[in-house]
Image: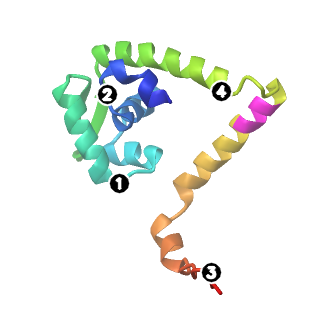
Amino acid sequence: MANRALRDVGLSAGARHVLAALEGHAGPLTPTDIADRMIQTPASVTSLLDTLARRGLVVREQDPSDRRRVLVSLTPEARGVVDRYLARIVALQSAVTARLTEPERLELVRMLAVIREDVATVDADDVMGKAQPRRAPRRG
């Protein structure tokens, strides 16, 4: 639904999420920080950053405190793009959650914040490595 509504922005969902992650943080982020926020691999985020940099929407700069690290920031042009599409996303989210009461919306936001915190601390490789294969149900 959101992808159709934002087709004219000319950005993939992943690119929009990168811009939103940067816009929602008070300052630049490393590519790894962006990947963690998006629950993506750093390699996937690097590809998105390459595209966004070519379009003039992000800049990569060396971290002045650690030259081995790269920091990613939004350009002024990107801020305008984000402002335009976030207003539309908020309108869409409001429409989708219109049947919820205000306390229910607040609880949903609280639960999503808990999930976001847990996503940042869970070792996905460890959890998935311990997962047991599901058996197909027996037919018969």
The local secondary structure at tag 1 comes to: loop
Label annotation for residue 96: 4
Query: Could you tell me which quadrant the C terminus lies in?
Result: bottom right
- Label 1, residues with CA under 10 Å away: few <14, some 14-19, many ≥20: few
* Relative height, residue 67 to residue 79 (above, below): below
Choose between 140 and 99: the one closer to the eye.
140
Q: CA distance from mark 1 to mark 3?
A: 33 Å
Q: Which residue is mark 3?
A: 137
Question: According to the image, label 1 marks what residue?
Answer: 41
Q: Earlier in the sequence, mark 3 or mark 4?
A: 4
Q: Position of residue 1 (x, y in %)?
A: 50, 30
Q: Are marks 1 and 2 in contact (CB under 8 Å)?
A: no
Residue 66 visible in this rendered orientation of the protein? no
130 relative position to 106: left or right: left
The residue positioned 83% from the left and 29% from the top of the image is 103
Q: Are marks 3 and 2 in contact (CB under 8 Å)?
A: no
Q: Is residue 36 left or right of residue 97?
A: left
Q: Is residue 66 left or right of residue 38?
A: left
- Could you tell me which residue is drawn at 39 percent across and 42 percent down? 34
Residue indicated by mark 2: 11
Give, as a single range, the part of the protein colored magenta. 104-108
Horizontal side of 79 relative to 92 (left or right) equals: left
Dot 2 or dot 4, earlier in sequence: 2
Residue 90: x percent and y percent? 57, 20
Q: Amino acid at mark 3?
A: Pro
Overall secondary structure of the magenta section: helix
